[in-house]
Structure formats: structure tokens, C-alpha cells
Amino acid sequence: MVAIEEKIRELEDKRAQLRARLAEIGDMRPGSLVERYRRCGKPGCRCAIDEAGKHGPSWSLTREVAGKTVTRVVPAAAVMRTQEQIAEYRRFRGLVHELVELSERLCEARLESGEAALQEAAKKGGSKKPSRRKSSPRSRRS
């Protein structure tokens, strides 16, 4: 029983550490940042003549919203910051996944602890019969 209690304390400490790491999460955003090169469609432009002469790069952030893919153009000046936000979102998702798994292990350990306590009480020879509850006196109406 002591080993289970130590395991529970250890899991609770790990959970507290994960919660602290979650509190440190900064700006985040889901999605993928894509670098694109395109052709403008003008017949005399370099992009129509030479494959390597395409215009770009232009950056777009793609993500799913309510089951539909949404794309947003990201200015070149904001690419580095957007990459950091995407990385932070992935870190957040990883921490949440760890927290859920840890919480599940903690719940299982607590169940084990409860079962062990019941088994220990049974070994001590608890009462054989459950106590009967006395009913409250009934009111007499005249």
C-alpha cells in the first residue's frame, strides 16, 4: 500500500510540473506554413519563359476550421514569428497529450489504492453484517 501511495505522490508531482510548463506557453497558432512560387500569367514575363523565374516566395498559413481548409497569406516580415507560434502550438499539443496520459495513470493508481484499502480492511476482519439503519419515528396523525 505504501508503494502505491508513493506512486500517486510521484504522479501528482509530475502533473504539477506539466501544469507549470503549460502555464509558460506563449502565443500559438495551429496550421502549416507553406512557401509558394507562382506564375503571374503575363505572356512576356520571366515566369512564363523560365521555370526558375517564378514569382515568390510568398507565404501562406493553412489550417482547418470547422472542417474546411482556410488559407491566409503571411507577410514575409512575419514568417519567423509565425513559425515560432506554430512550434509553440505543437509544444502545447504535446504537453496536453502528456497531461492526459499522466492523469489516466494517476486515476488508475488511485483505483489501485482504493482496491488495496478494501482488501486490507477485509483482512482485518471488518464486521460481517452491514449495520441496519433505524427508521425515524413515524408521525401520528389524529
Image (cartoon, rainbow, N blue to C red):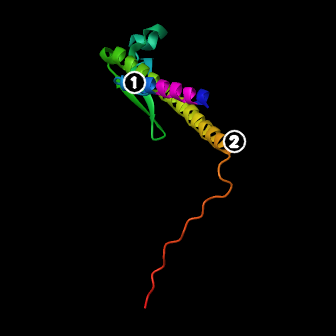
The amino acid type of the residue labelled 2 equals: Lys
Residue occupying image coordinates x 40% and y 10%: 46
Asked if disc 2 and disc 1 are in contact, CB closer than 8 Å, the reply is no
- 37 to 142, vertically: above or below: above
Q: Where's the N terminus, which quadrant?
A: top right
Graded by Cα atoms within 10 Å as few (under 14), some (14 to 19) or many (20 or more), the crowding at tag 1 reads few
What residue span does the magenta drawing correspond to? Answer: 5-15
Q: Which mark is residue 123?
A: 2
- Residue 14 part of the magenta segment: yes
Residue occupying image coordinates x 45% and y 24%: 18
The answer to whether one can see residue 32 in this image is no
Instruction: Name the foreground residue: 2 vs 19.
Output: 2
Q: Which residue is mark 1?
A: 20
> In the shown orientation, is residue 9 left or right of residue 108?
left
Instruction: Name the foreground residue: 139 vs 89.
Output: 139
Mark 2 secondary-structure assignment: helix
Mark 1 secondary-structure assignment: helix
Residue 71 falls in image quadrant: top left
The amino acid type of the residue labelled 1 equals: Ala
Instruction: Name the foreground residue: 85 vs 140.
Output: 140
Tell me which numbered mark, 2 or 1, is placed earlier along the sequence: 1
> In the shown orientation, is residue 114 left or right of residue 48?
right
